[in-house]
């Protein structure tokens, strides 16, 4: 089936193209020392450490904490709330969700916003660097996405809104994003020893970061497409078999077409666990004003509750 064109422009207020005009296709990729040390240490502890200090309790902790941080943290906190503001939440609950998002281990909240927004801007240009399109072989793309950063020759300006940039707690999360694992590591050690630390911290972070890269590579290269974003160098693709693993973030073609939607699984049968949780949270007043702009081709409101 020919994908439907999306005629809904998406202008990110945090991106200022300025003058001279920026270029998304020219830049250099270099290793980020912090990422190399951080992910390298998680790799050692998450593989060797988890094998040496194996326990079934540690495995169970790994499964539960990974599912929890990916759903409440990465999907609901970092992506749908902090980056896209697709719903509103009480301030204390927003802090909690974003903290769980930081625990996923990708970066601090503001660095994550910048990486997401610059990538999104680049993918919507006529041409973009292979770093943004996952255009290199898997082994080089893995190295680039996990351990490196890109410096564009002419990059757009990125400005975080004042409610985030001037917030003391968000600035603390940004400066000490790695250290936020420490209280949880101490708690896990007190309960389950080194096994719980290796499985509940290192293995969880390692699998979450690698999974984020792997699903992102698929979602920008192959898979189903119902929508086509006109003029974009990179199209999003839906990756149905990862719906439960990604908490609904796998419906990336839908997301490219409707980036402000709180609901990512738009069609019947597109499972979206993150949306299910949001609907449950809305019953308790913890998720409000869910952005429900996408209207299906049959004319009904996708996000009607």
Image: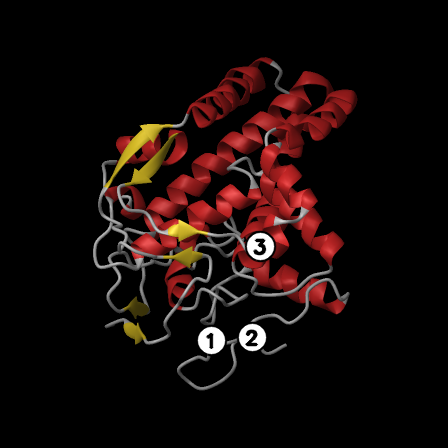
Q: Which residue corresponds to mark 1?
A: 294
Instruction: Tell which circle, 1 or 2, labels the residue nearer the N-terminal end.
Output: 1
Which x, y percent locates residue 296? 44, 79
Q: Residue at x 54, y 45 (%)?
A: 110
Mark 3 = which residue? 82
Q: Residues within 10 Å of mark 1 (few under 14, many from 20)?
A: many
Is disc 1 in contact with disc 2, using a CB cutoff of under 8 Å? yes
The answer to whether any part of residue 89 appears in the image is yes
Distance CA(mark 1)–CA(mark 2):
8 Å
Q: Is residue 160 left or right of residue 146?
A: right
- The spot of residue 147 in percent (x, y) is 39, 29
Q: Position of residue 106 (x, y in %)?
A: 51, 37
The residue to which callout 2 is attached is 303
Q: Earlier in the sequence, mark 2 or mark 3?
A: 3
SS at circle 2 = loop
For mark 3, give the secondary structure.
Answer: helix
């Amino acid at each position: 089936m020919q994908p439907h064109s999306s005629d809904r422009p998406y202008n990110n207020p945090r991106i200022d193209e300025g003058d001279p005009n920026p270029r998304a296709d020219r830049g250099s990729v270099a290793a980020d020392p912090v990422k190399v040390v951080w992910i390298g240490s998680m790799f050692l502890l998450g593989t060797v450490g988890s094998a040496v200090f194996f326990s079934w309790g540690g495995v169970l902790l790994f499964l539960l904490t990974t599912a929890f941080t990916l759903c409440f943290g990465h999907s609901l906190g970092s992506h749908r709330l902090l980056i896209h503001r697709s719903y509103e939440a009480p301030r204390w609950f927003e802090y909690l969700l974003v903290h769980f998002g930081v625990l996923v281990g990708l970066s601090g909240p503001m660095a994550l916003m910048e990486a997401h927004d610059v990538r999104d801007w680049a993918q919507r240009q006529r041409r973009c660097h292979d770093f943004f399109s996952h255009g290199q072989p898997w082994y080089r793309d893995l190295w680039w996405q996990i351990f490196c950063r890109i410096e564009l020759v002419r990059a757009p300006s990125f400005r975080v809104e004042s409610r985030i940039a001037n917030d003391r707690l968000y600035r603390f999360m940004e400066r000490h994003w790695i250290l936020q694992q420490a209280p949880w590591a101490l708690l896990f050690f007190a309960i389950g020893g080194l096994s719980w630390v290796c499985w509940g911290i290192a293995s969880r972070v390692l699998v979450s970061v690698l999974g984020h890269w792997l699903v992102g590579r698929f979602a920008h290269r192959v898979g189903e497409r119902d929508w086509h974003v006109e003029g974009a160098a990179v199209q999003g693709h839906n990756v149905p078999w990862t719906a439960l693993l990604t908490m609904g973030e796998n419906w990336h073609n839908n997301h490219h077409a409707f980036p402000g939607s709180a609901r990512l699984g738009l069609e019947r049968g597109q499972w979206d666990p993150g949306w299910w949780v949001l609907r449950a949270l809305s019953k308790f007043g913890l998720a409000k004003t869910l952005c429900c702009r996408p209207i299906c081709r049959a004319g009904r409101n996708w996000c009607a509750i």
